[in-house]
Image (cartoon, rainbow, N blue to C red):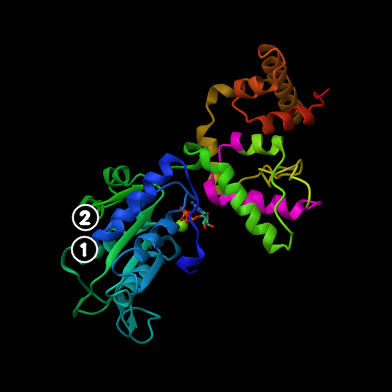
Amino acid sequence: MKYDQQIIIGESPAFLEIIEQASRAARHDRPVLVIGERGTGKELIASRLHFLSPRWEQKFVQVNCAALPDTLLESELFGHEAGSYTGAQGKRIGRFEEADKGTIFLDEIATTSLSAQEKILRITEYGTFQRVGSNKTIHTDVRIIGAANIDLPSAAEAGDFRHDLLDRLALDVITLPSLRHRKEDILILAIHFGQKIAQEVGWESFPGFSESVIEMLLEHTWPGNVRELKNVIERAVYYSENEFHPIEGVLLDPFNSPYRPSTVSSKHKVKIQKEIKPETAIFNEPLDFQESVENHEKELLHHALNKSKFNQKEAAKFLNLNYHQLRHQLKKHNLLS
Ligand SMILES: Nc1ncnc2c1ncn2[C@@H]1O[C@H](COP(=O)(O)OP(=O)(O)OP(=O)(O)O)[C@@H](O)[C@H]1O
Ligand SMILES: [Mg+2]
């Protein structure tokens, strides 16, 4: 993807401040860390850092560190000599060598092994490294941009990330605000994506959103941030039946279905079992699980509606649901008049 094809959208003060920080950081040619929840635009900011830097005409090499197992990642990053490990055929130039004079973007840097981190540290300090299976020292002049969606100081405290590498990379740390921390941008982004997708599907223009959809978009907490918003809008445009009418409905959770499987992977099952406290197992008589859950849900809804004097927005707040989720529950239990 080329930088000039990617428009960065956002007008909230929190976001503008970050764009400003990224523009300043682009100039100093030192390492930068880009931190943020999933889908907040880390990749977009990393490419902005490169293309606004003095290295913009040189290579911008991107590596997703989470995509490869430890040994293959080291070979990918630093290259290897022929026969250095089983399956290594021929000599291979690593990504650090490829990025010489340019920028390397180490996405999901927190997932790298301590051994890879040690080698990256050497590059930040001396600009040198060795290919896997070789003693020859190679020089490289790269600017490192790292990205993570976890708190790196906590990872360092836990022994999963080297303190010394963190100190070297943390010269400038750009922390992207999540979408729920910049609600002013939700509609601007939604309209931007709406217009883009409407154009792609051949609509004359984008008709906008109905009031209730706008309310829903503003109330959602967006755990998947901008990527999630983009998907929601894309789906809404594809499903809309009238291109001249404001979009009336959006599906926030595509997994929502009465047939949704209740099973989780065995990996997750163990965790859930561990979290169940023994005191919850107080039932002696056999019972119908589905019926009990439904009754409990109804009880909660009645309680919240009574408490809020039948104000649905208040009731949703009381149950820590958004308005859309509450309406869905009320509909499910036939509680809508
Ligand atoms: N401010 C923005 N303006 C326009 N598009 C954006 C913006 N922020 C993110 N996007 C879009 O949202 C999607 C996710 O962005 P990106 O891949 O940069 O996020 P990320 O933080 O790297 O996510 P992950 O942690 O999941 O890798 C992309 O399609 C990107 O183009
Ligand atoms: Mg990313």
Q: Is residue 167 above or below residue 74?
A: above
Amino acid type for the residue under numbered disc 2 = Arg
Confirm or reject: label 1 Cβ below 8 Å from ligand 2: no
Q: Which mark is residue 124?
A: 1
Report if residue 192 lies within the magenta region: no
Please state which of residues 216 and 287 is positioned toward the viewer in this rendering.
216
Task: Please name the amino acid that badge 1 sits on.
Answer: Thr
Which residue is located at x 56 percent, y 46 percent?
A: 188
Residue bounds of the magenta highlight: 218-243
Across and down, in percent, residue 169 comes to 25, 55
Residue 138 lies, in percent from the top left, at 20, 78
Please give left or right for residue 43 compared with residue 57 in the image: right
Q: Is residue 220 above or below residue 109?
A: above
Mark 2: secondary structure: helix
Report which residue position mark 2 lands on. 168
Q: Residues within 10 Å of mark 1 (few under 14, many from 20)?
A: some
Q: How many marks?
A: 2
Q: Tell me the crowding category of disc 2: few under 14, some 14 to 19, or many 20 or more residues within 10 angstroms, Cα based.
A: some
Q: Quadrant of the C terminus?
A: top right
